[in-house]
Structure formats: structure tokens, C-alpha cells
Amino acid sequence: MPSAYSIPKIYEEEIAGAIAAGYYSNKSEVVRDALRLLFESRQELRKAAAIELYRREEATLGRASELAGMSSIEFKEVLADKGIFLIMEPRAKYQQKKQMELIKRLRAKK
């Protein structure tokens, strides 16, 4: 997901200095490290991002839980506390439909 961002000149200079000092080999490494540290140090930000990705259906429950740094059970509780309903994934919907068809057939035989 290549992107372009503008940052203040002071940060550009600091990045150039860190690269020149040998701490990083390029700007991308600096940005990756900075983002990793940001999300590791701010758990609420990490959790909020995961919730939003899940709410917009851009992440599955398992992936969103992983992004939030939580078990899926813990993440489900967070979603419930925020009034966000679980999104049924296509395979689960298909399985539920098949089970409902079976129940209807069994009831019809009575």
C-alpha cells in the first residue's frame, strides 16, 4: 500500500540524520519503526483502529482481534460494550442457511 505523506521539515531532517548515522538504511524503515512504536505504546489507538476496521468490514473478527492485541473473546466483549454487532462471515452465513433448511425439512416431516 504505497502512500505519500508530507511531514514537517524538522522531521525530514531528523530522518536524514538517523539514516546518515547508520540507524536506518532508508526512510521507509524509519516510518515503519515509528508506526510500530506508536501502535505498541498506545493500546487504545490500536484497539480503536481494529474496531473501526472490523466495523467497516475491512477486517475479520480474527484479524481485528489480532490487530487489537486481544483474544477474539475479549474483542467480542469490547464490541458488545460499544454496541457493535458481530458480522457474520460468508461461510458462517452459508452454514447457517443450510442448518435452517435442514430444520425446516425435519419439521415438515413431523
Image: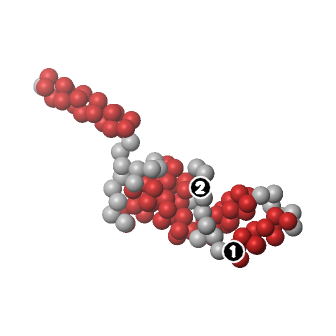
Q: Is residue 56 left or right of residue 25?
A: left
Q: Is residue 61 left or right of residue 97?
A: right
Point 78% across, 67% down: residue: 16
> What amino acid does circle 2 point to?
Ser
Report x, y in % for residue 81: 37, 66
Q: Give SS at disc 2.
A: loop
Q: Is residue 94 above or below residue 82?
A: above
In the picture as drawn, the residue positioned furthest to the top comes out as 109
What residue is drawn where x is 76% and y is 72%?
Answer: 14
Q: Is residue 85 left or right of residue 33?
A: left
Tell me the residue that label 2 is attached to. 3
- Which residue occupies 55% across, 56% down? 67
From the image, state whether disc 2 or disc 1 is nearer to you: 1
Number of marks: 2
- The mark that comes first in sequence, 2 or 1, is 2
What is the number of the mark on residue 39?
A: none
Mark 1 closeness class: few <14, some 14–19, many ≥20 residues within 10 Å: few
Residue 9, labelled with which disc? 1
Instruction: Count residues near mark 2 (Cα–Cα under 10 Å), then give few for <14, some for 14-19, many for 20+.
Output: few
**From this viewpoint, is residue 74 visible?**
no
Residue 6: % across, % down? 61, 67
User: Residue 7 appears at what percent x and percent y?
Assistant: 63, 70
User: Along the line of sight, which residue is nearer the eye, 107 or 91?
Assistant: 91
The quarter of the picture where the C terminus appears is: top left
Residue 39 in view (yes/no) = yes
Residue 8 figure quarter = bottom right
